[in-house]
Image (cartoon, rainbow, N blue to C red):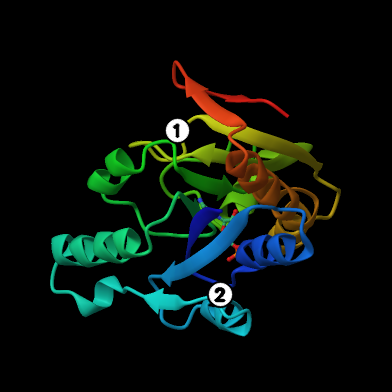
Amino acid sequence: MLRVLVCVSGGGTNLQALIDAVEQGSVTDTEIVQVISNNRNAYALQRAAAHGIRGVCVSPKDFPERAAFYDSFLQAVDDAAPDLIVLAGFLVVLPEAMIRKYRNRILNIHPSLIPSFCGAGYYGLKVHEEALKRGVRVTGATVHFVDEGTDTGPIVLQKAVSVMDGDTPAVLQRRVMEEAEWILLPEAVELFAHGKITVKDGRAVVTK
Ligand code: GAR
């Protein structure tokens, strides 16, 4: 059984997609053992509770300095004894010690086709605002492993989504979630659970 820890900051629709996929059996041999949020008010914590999943909050606001927050956060991560960590809309930059310790075992979902519209400052609605500003006709989502850079780790899965005339950032965000994110994230976890993702020379190799 793959032990999955999910880190969240907000609404948690990607967490929900993963919970549903586990409950409905499209993701197998997998248990979501814990959810960690940096934000006490994240609706994602309520989603976890509604499905009997332990949720904990480790907020930087509760610590005088970053290092103390990181120590406490990493302790909470280790306590969950995860085989896989999923960042599902988690807006905290991870401590480097965590990236080293869990190399190629942390998956992030990003709402664009990396390397477009990614990197520092590109998160949530901002990504879609920039895609619309640039006038791209196609955007999408990416699941990738987390390395020391921002959105620079090995790419596991990507799915393209059309941009429509008249899209607003919110409309586009919703379409990217529905047509790409909520499909890709469970698919990536299922692949990982069955040893179908390896990393070679800094690139992910996926056997379907
Ligand atoms: C999702 O669109 C996710 O791809 C994005 O935040 C949203 C969280 O929504 N993540 C990033 O932008 C990371 N750079 P959710 O809380 O409803 O899953």
Q: Residue at x 26, y 76 (%)?
A: 61
Farthest residue, direction top: 201
Picture layout, residue 108 above or below residue 197: below
Picture layout, residue 182 above or below residue 196: below
First of labels 1, 2 by sequence position = 2
Picture quadrant where residue 70 is located: bottom left
Label 2 near ligand 1 (CB < 8 Å): yes
Q: Residue at x 32, y 73 (%)?
A: 58
Q: Position of residue 12 (x, y in %)?
A: 59, 69
For mark 2, what is the residue?
A: 44
Kind of residue at badge 2? Ala
- Which quadrant of the figure contains the C terminus? top right
Q: Under tag 1, what secondary structure?
A: loop
Picture quadrant where residue 196 is located: top right
Q: Position of residue 149 (x, y in %)?
A: 36, 36
Kind of residue at badge 1? Thr
Question: Image check: 80 left or right of 172?
Answer: left
Q: Under tag 2, what secondary structure?
A: helix
For the question of whether residue 152 can be seen, the reply is yes
Q: Ligand 1: which quarter?
A: bottom right
For mark 1, what is the residue?
A: 152
Question: Image check: 136 left or right of 122?
Answer: right
Q: Residue at x 45, y 33 (%)?
A: 152
Please rate how many residues cluster around mark 1, counting C-alpha atoms within 10 Å: few if below 14, some from 14 to 19, many from 20.
Answer: some
Q: Residue at x 33, y 37 (%)?
A: 148
Q: Position of residue 125 (x, y in %)?
A: 60, 59
Give the distance between the C-alpha atoms of the residues marked 1 and 2, in whole angstroms: 26 Å
Picture quadrant where residue 97 is located: top left
Instruction: Tell how many labels.
Output: 2
